Image: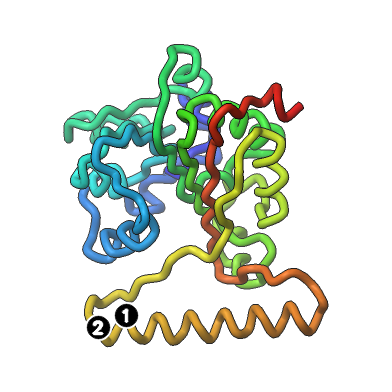
Amino acid sequence: MAADEPARAAGAPDGYAGYAQWKGWQGSFTPSAREARYFAAEFGGLDLAGMRLLEIGFGNGSLLAWARGRGAQVRGLELDAGLCEAGQRAGFDVGQHSLADLLARGDRYDLIVAFDVLEHWDHAELVTNFATLHGLLIEGGRFIARFPNGQSPFGRVYQHGDFSHRSTLSTYKIEYLARLSGFEVERVANACRVSAKAGILAALRQRFLARQRRLIERRIARLYGIRRLPLDPNLVAVLRRPAGNTQQEQA
């Protein structure tokens, strides 16, 4: 489930009743071929071997399984007790812990991932959780998040496709939250796209379409005299905890 603040996990809120069934999640913990290509593209610059990775809202478990297959030491958080049970049966370290619980017991991670999660947090939770995420990462550790693109008309299909969404995110909001919590912004960009079919021709077609979309973004920026902003339906933010950085230093 694209999790709300995990501290609510003792009993999933009413807004999540039947959520896993609606999403078609059964706790398979096996990435599809397309998911594997997507993860490889989105994490292309990172060597996951030996990394301590935490996923917030692991859903069907595809990313945890893919990352573990590349040598990462993975842990997952979820609201849905059934999905947690499925993950534990599959041998994964997963549960309904809160971020605050993990911080209090001294957990630290090299990489924290939240795909389709931030939009489930309200504004107060975003501020609190970003600060906690900062504390959970080692120096140089990264937080990677995917969320509906609130600055694009094309993001509305995802933003308004789920009653449990509580906030709308954009490049500017992510930059603000990063500064507030002591992160450096490595990038806020369009999410990677992969074709339903594998192969060179499909990949070339995706590259061609991506170039056309980028051209439209540049034209819109020039037309309206604004900063060029990514306009795909989903954005991905990569934030880094810099060495020697503390929230007190940022205050």
Three-letter residue code for mark 2: Ile
Where does residue 59 sit, x and y in percent of width and height?
36, 44
Report if residue 110 is visible in the image: yes
Label 1 neighbourhood size at 10 Å, few (<14), some (14-19), many (20+)?
A: some
Report if residue 82 is visible in the image: no
Three-letter residue code for mark 1: Ala
Query: Residues under labels 1 and 2: Cα distance?
Result: 5 Å
Residues under numbered marks 1 and 2 in contact, where contact means CB atoms less than 8 Å apart: yes
Q: Nearer the viewer, residue 108 or 152?
A: 108
Q: Nearer the viewer, residue 140 or 209?
A: 140
Q: Quickly name the residue at label 2.
A: 200
Where does residue 155 sit, x and y in percent of width and height?
60, 66
Q: Quickly name the residue at label 1.
A: 203
Question: In the displayed structure, does residue 168 sit left or right of residue 29?
Answer: right
Question: In the displayed structure, does residue 51 sit left or right of residue 239?
Answer: left
Q: Nearer the viewer, residue 67 or 248?
A: 248
